[in-house]
């Protein structure tokens, strides 16, 4: 128990220490976005005024924007292109080890045989059920907006590219790729994320079963995970603003302003979608599993949702969440003390919804048809990533890149759209966090009811006096 409390305290300390850095990086990224739009609009106006064949524009394009890996860029410099690619490669290199260590360590802790009681099993099942419903509804919302043309961009000069990394569009074909035939080949490509998730899940469960025998391996994975998180934190805090400025400037200069409207639609879809799911999934889940009126739950968890939206931190919201569950929702302390810290680490429905909508926006805006089979793959990867989301700034948005690679979205236009998601995620994040924290409270109520330990009178009553003081 003391080890668990120490681990939870360490997790809260890490996330709290990143909170100030998170606010700082948000401000700097916001400034980079504004400057990028201004610089990009200026370059676009210059290109339209001079024409693509003008020597002045050709020199500027060769110096800053040209793709130096293409035939047209053989003699170019492409400074902005180089900066953007280096930033993306720095994220790419951490993808496989990040997923492997984060997911395996999360499952190793969650599936500790000493914790595998009835409470733990019901908690895990409830988490998975909420994940499945959230992913299905988020995919439906994203596909509907995509079909209605909300994310569509009219790409100039035939810049749309075909998706080449997925051979079949049958969702069942992905089952074959989940189990790798060669371990090294799965780890050598960022396009085999589902296989990496499978290996991480098996590794985490096996480590939990073997106990102290694999403590050296667990220590190695923990240290490796800390190193990866530190590297990613450095890349995001130090390099993201400049890189995002370069990518947005280059994107606007070459592709025009067509991406502004779809970006705003993505932001609105994420905000409205997450808020809508918040008022549908959890109240309905409580009604179906407990037959209790969900209105008291909605009323009492409203402050949790608002606090989560304001802080954008599940760790900072945890004390208020636990207090509300025990004093107002009638959940016992022994169940709350397990469900809430566990949910803070591995239960992130809002993050899953955001990632699915974001990947659909990225693919569609880049001229790639996001098919239902690709959405299935994206949902599976998103749920797997949510189980092992690391405590780094903008972690959920950063892991959008993992989902992108898992469905083969690695073209230059996809990278441009991803930079917009990374830069403009603050407001959508305010709608994402309430789904994460309220979902933990809903799970707590359901598990407590299933164990016959929920105080129904307290659940149905008004706010407790002890809290109101």
Image (spheres, helix red, strand yellow):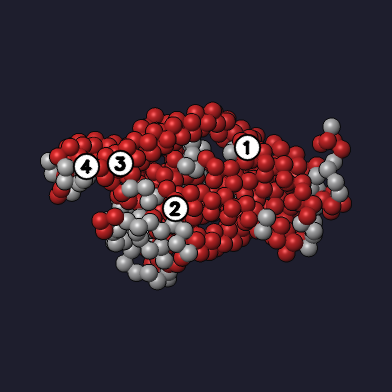
Q: Position of residue 438 (x, y in %)?
A: 67, 48
At label 3, counting other C-alpha atoms closer than 10 Å, the crowd grade (few under 14, some 14-19, many 20 or more) is some
Q: Position of residue 136 (x, y in %)?
A: 55, 63
The mark closer to the camera, 1 or 4, is 4
The mark closer to the camera, 4 or 2, is 4
Query: Viewer-proximal residue, 266 or 122?
Result: 266
In the rendered image, the quadrant that contains the C terminus is top right
Q: Position of residue 176 (x, y in %)?
A: 38, 67
Which residue is labeled 2 in the image? 262
| Precedes in sequence: disc 4 or disc 3 | 3
Q: Spatial distance from mark 3 to mark 1, Cα to Cα?
A: 38 Å
In the rendered image, the quadrant that contains the N terminus is top right
Q: Spatial distance from mark 4 to mark 2, Cα to Cα?
A: 27 Å
Which residue is labeled 1 in the image? 310
Query: What residue sits 35% from the left and 57% below the top?
Result: 154
| Precedes in sequence: disc 3 or disc 1 | 3
Residue 45 is labelled as 3
Which residue is labeled 4 in the image? 50
Q: Spatial distance from mark 2 to mark 3, Cα to Cα?
A: 21 Å
Query: What residue sits 49% from the left and 39% below the top?
Result: 394
The mark closer to the camera, 3 or 1, is 3
Q: Spatial distance from mark 1 to mark 2, Cα to Cα?
A: 26 Å
| Precedes in sequence: disc 2 or disc 3 | 3
């Amino acid at each position: 128990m003391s080890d668990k409390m120490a681990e939870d305290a360490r997790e809260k300390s890490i996330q709290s220490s990143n909170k100030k850095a998170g606010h700082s990086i948000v401000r700097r990224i916001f400034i980079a976005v504004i400057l990028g739009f201004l610089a990009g609009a200026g370059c676009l106006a210059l290109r339209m005024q001079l024409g693509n064949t003008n020597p002045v524009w050709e020199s500027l394009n060769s110096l800053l924007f040209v793709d130096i890996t293409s035939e047209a860029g053989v003699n170019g410099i492409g400074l902005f292109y180089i900066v953007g690619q280096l930033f993306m490669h720095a994220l790419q290199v951490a993808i496989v080890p990040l997923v492997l260590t984060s997911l395996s360590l999360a499952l190793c802790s969650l599936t500790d045989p000493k914790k595998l009681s009835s409470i733990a099993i019901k908690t895990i099942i409830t988490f998975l059920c909420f994940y499945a419903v959230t992913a299905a509804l988020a995919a439906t919302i994203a596909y509907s907006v995509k079909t209605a043309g909300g994310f569509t961009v009219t790409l100039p000069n035939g810049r749309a590219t075909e998706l080449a990394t997925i051979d079949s569009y049958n969702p069942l074909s992905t089952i074959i790729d989940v189990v790798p035939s060669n371990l090294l080949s799965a780890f050598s490509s960022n396009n085999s994320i589902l296989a990496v998730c499978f290996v991480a899940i098996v590794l985490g469960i096996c480590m939990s079963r073997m106990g102290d025998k694999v403590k050296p391996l667990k220590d190695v994975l923990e240290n490796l995970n800390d190193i990866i998180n530190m590297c990613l934190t450095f890349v995001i805090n130090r390099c993201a603003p400049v890189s995002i400025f370069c990518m947005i400037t280059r994107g606007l200069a070459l592709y025009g302003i067509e991406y502004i409207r779809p970006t705003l639609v993505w932001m609105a879809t994420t905000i409205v979608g997450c808020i809508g799911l918040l008022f549908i999934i959890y109240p309905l889940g409580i009604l179906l599993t407990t037959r209790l009126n969900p209105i008291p739950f909605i009323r009492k968890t409203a402050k949790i949702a608002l606090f989560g939206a304001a802080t954008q931190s599940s760790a900072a919201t945890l004390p208020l969440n636990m207090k509300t569950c025990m004093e107002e929702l009638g959940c016992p302390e022994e169940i709350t003390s397990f469900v809430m810290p566990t949910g803070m680490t591995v239960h992130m429905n809002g993050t899953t919804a955001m990632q699915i909508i974001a990947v659909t926006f990225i693919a569609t805006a880049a001229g790639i048809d996001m098919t239902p089979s690709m959405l299935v793959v994206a949902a599976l990867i998103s749920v797997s990533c949510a189980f092992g989301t690391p405590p780094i700034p903008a972690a959920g948005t950063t892991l959008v890149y993992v989902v992108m690679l898992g469905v083969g979205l690695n073209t230059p236009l996809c990278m441009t759209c991803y930079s917009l998601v990374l830069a403009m995620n603050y407001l959508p994040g305010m709608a994402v966090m309430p789904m994460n924290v309220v979902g933990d409270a809903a799970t707590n109520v359901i598990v407590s009811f299933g164990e016959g330990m929920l105080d129904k009178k307290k659940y149905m009553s008004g706010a407790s006096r002890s809290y109101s003081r």
